[in-house]
Amino acid sequence: MNTTLRNILLIIGAVVLVAAGLAMVNLEPKNQLDLAGFANKVRDGQVQEIVLRGNRMEVTLTDNTKFFVDKEESISVSELLKNYGIDEETSRGIKTTVKEPSGVAFWGSIALQTLLPLILIFALMMFFFRQVQGQNNRAMNFGQSTARETPKGQEKVTFADVAGVREAKQELMEVVEFLKQPEKFAKLGAKIPKGVLLMGSPGTGKTLLARAVAGEADVPFLHISGSEFVEMFVGVGASRVRDLFTKAKKTAPCIVFIDEIDAVGRQRGSGLGGSHDEREQTLNQILVEMDGFEPNLGVIVVAATNRPDVLDPALLRPGRFDRRVVLDPPDIRDREEILTIHAKNKPLSKDVSLKKLAERTPGFSGADLMNLMNEAAILAARRNRTEVGMNELLESIEKVMLGPERKSHLMKEDERKVTAYHEAGHALVAHLLPHTDPVQKVSIISRGRAAGYTIKLPLEDRTMKTREEYVEDIAMTMGGYAAERIIFGDITTGASNDMRQATATARSMVTQWGMSNLLGPRSYGRREDMIFLGREIHEERDYSESKAEIIDKEIDLLIKQGLETAEKLISSNRPAMDRIANYLTTHETIEREQFADIVGLPPANAKNILKKEEQA
């Protein structure tokens, strides 16, 4: 039983026992009568018998009714009656019996009155003693590691349960094989790697891969989070690191998994606290344990982080984390495999195509795809369906990307019209530019913080984009702003996010990607994370004020060119935009198949679309 629960039950029991004792001592009989009433009944001849027990009289009436009367200790029954004017002859006619109280009752009453308070005091003392003892034990265990070992009976995750990341699985499979067959590699003089660092964006499967290693390797697996080392007391983190590796060496060969190692592995000497910083002390101990003076045989450290750029160089050198495994976002084939895994325990209808879902989810991580399937199952259950259909899956894509529908958010008719033309401007410009992605869906239904949205999806997964593609992206982004200005002669706050996005793209083109004709192939501004200030970013200006003016002019020029392109396309294709806006006002949503018929114009990248459809 839990110690805290046992102490609570002890106190409750003692209190109940004392309350019961006090209740027994002070228990009043139900039929209690005062002396005057007793005398009146004697005077009326209703009393048949009196049984005297100490100071209490048990009186029986002629109708066999009983009641109790308390008298003074120093006065007898006859004297009591005489004081109330009752003659001796009447008193003699009543049968009187004297019974002495038993020794058990006497000592029992004494025990209840004296021992129970002592028991309560003793119980309270024991409670506080146990609390103090528990604090001492916790203080003694303060420096011990909190790493947990994966239970043997727990359901295992294997590499078969991890889709995609083929290179990462290959690297980790070699580590598992090292542990299972060390002699195979020892014959060739190969040494087992001491550390494997998993790097990737959030949701790409770093922790899942570590669980798969635990399932594949038939060795002890200790797992801990990087934040569990650090405490406010200096030296506790280092002590926990020593204890962790002591446990690991006792069970070697084994694997130690440290999740979010950047919590303690950030670069030293770049923040507050000097050399006595607790985080730096912990990192120093990790460095020594992984590759210090004493050999660390049979212990492989697997760590995960999504911020490898802030890790200390000493942690990344060979001999510590020998292997760095990068987990990229899944491509279309990986997304289909991930969806297949998460669809295993979900009844899907016949119209569901996981391949189409994979095509419509570029940029989704493994965690996003898992959330997508779960949201679709929840939506199907809410609609009382027995199977998860394609409609639920497509709606869940938009929910994961933008948030839930805000059906209660009713727009006024004029706001509805502005939103329809705003989204029509985005969609039409994207449709008429040759390098933009095809329009997949246009809607004026509010989702998340967006009053409406336009979804365009790439024809294939890409890792690079040209300058012309970014220029057209800016034009498409400014399409909503241009439509509002052309149709209504004014602009609204609905384009605020578009302007931020266009400005960010233009600034990156000029300062980071060397896409400026005037400034040439050079990056401007060195951006560094302030480690001790969380997500705050500090930019060091490594250029002059004259260059800063040119940067501003180039950014303004790119945005102005994009806006002019959007206005030109919208003005020359006004009937097409009116058809899109009118349809949105009536039906709220346009899918890809309907969009081409409503616009009535072939897309500028029609050749690429037809080629892609033929390949599919």
Image (tube, rainbow, N blue to C red):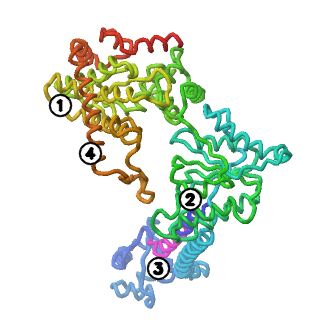
Mark 3 touching mark 2, by CB under 8 A? no
Numbered disc 1: secondary structure: loop
Query: Magenta stretch?
Result: 13-28
- Residue 99 shows up from this direction: no
Residue at the (66%, 55%) spot, across then down = 320
Q: Which residue is mark 3?
A: 56
Disc 3 to disc 4, how far (Cα)? Answer: 107 Å
Q: Main secondary structure of the magenta part?
A: helix
Q: CA distance from mark 3 to mark 2?
A: 70 Å
Q: Quadrant of residue 107?
A: bottom right
What amino acid type should be assigned to the residue bearing mark 3? Arg
Cα distance in 3D space between marks 4 and 2: 48 Å
Q: Are marks 2 and 1 in contact (CB under 8 Å)?
A: no
Q: Amino acid at mark 2?
A: Glu
User: Which residue was labeled with disc 2?
Assistant: 228
Q: From the image, tell me which residue sits under label 1.
A: 491
* The stretch drawn in magenta includes residue 292: no
Along the viewing direction, whichever of 385 and 596 lies nearer the viewer: 596
- Residue at 47 percent across and 69 percent down: it is 273
Most extreme residue toward the bottom is 74
Which of 285/554 is in front? 554
Mark 1 → mark 4, Cα distance in angstroms? 27 Å
Q: In the image, is residue 14 part of the stretch drawn in magenta?
A: yes
**Quick one: SS at disc 2?**
helix
Residue identifier under label 4: 549
Residue 433 screen position, x and y as percent: 34, 19
Answer few, some or many: residues within 10 Å of disc 1's Cα (few below 14, many 20 plus, some between 14 and 19).
some
